[in-house]
Amino acid sequence: MKKYFSILLVIAMLFSAAPAFAVPSENIDAPDIIIDTLLLRPLGIVSTVFGGAFFVVSLPFAAITSSVGKSYELLVKDPFEYTFRRPLGQIRKSD
């Protein structure tokens, strides 16, 4: 039983590493990761919170002018994606 469990564990470890090799290699330096972790991510969280608050305040005006989608994208979606969905250390937008 131990033998089968060991084989199953090795196979699981081999297949779990495959997605890591599928990611394109990028040149991310340690200073970029440090700046991103200590400065940009906290500022992104603050920007997301304030953007959400400003979106709620601007919602009646945006509804009148039919620009709710654009204001949501600029005030809520973009800061959220920059903060929580961007890979760590990727400061500049990739082309």
Image (cartoon, rainbow, N blue to C red):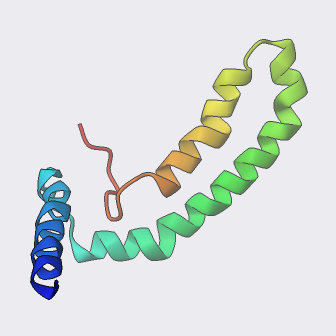
Quadrant (top left/top right/bottom left/bottom right) for the N terminus:
bottom left
Residue drawn at x 21%, y 64% is 28
Farthest-out residue, front: 1
From what the image shows, is residue 61 above or below residue 25? above
- Residue 43 in the image: above or below residue 72: below
In the rendering, at what x and y percent does residue 93 appear? Answer: 32, 45
Q: Position of residue 36 (x, y in %)?
A: 41, 68
- Give residue 21's quadrant in the image: bottom left
Reply above or below: 54 against 46: above
**In the picture provided, is 13 more to the left or to the right than 49?**
left
Question: Image quadrant of residue 77?
Answer: top right
The number of discs equals 0
- Residue that extends furthest to the bottom in the rendered view of this protein: 2
Q: Residue at x 30, y 69 (%)?
A: 32
Which residue is at 36% across, 77% downward? 34
Residue at (12% x, 55% y) in the render? 25
Q: Nearer the viewer, residue 55 or 22?
A: 22
Residue 34 horizontal side relative to residue 1, left or right: right
The image quadrant where one finds the C terminus is: top left
Quarter-of-image position of residue 59: top right
Above or below: residue 35 compared with residue 58 = below
Nearest the eye: 84 or 92: 84
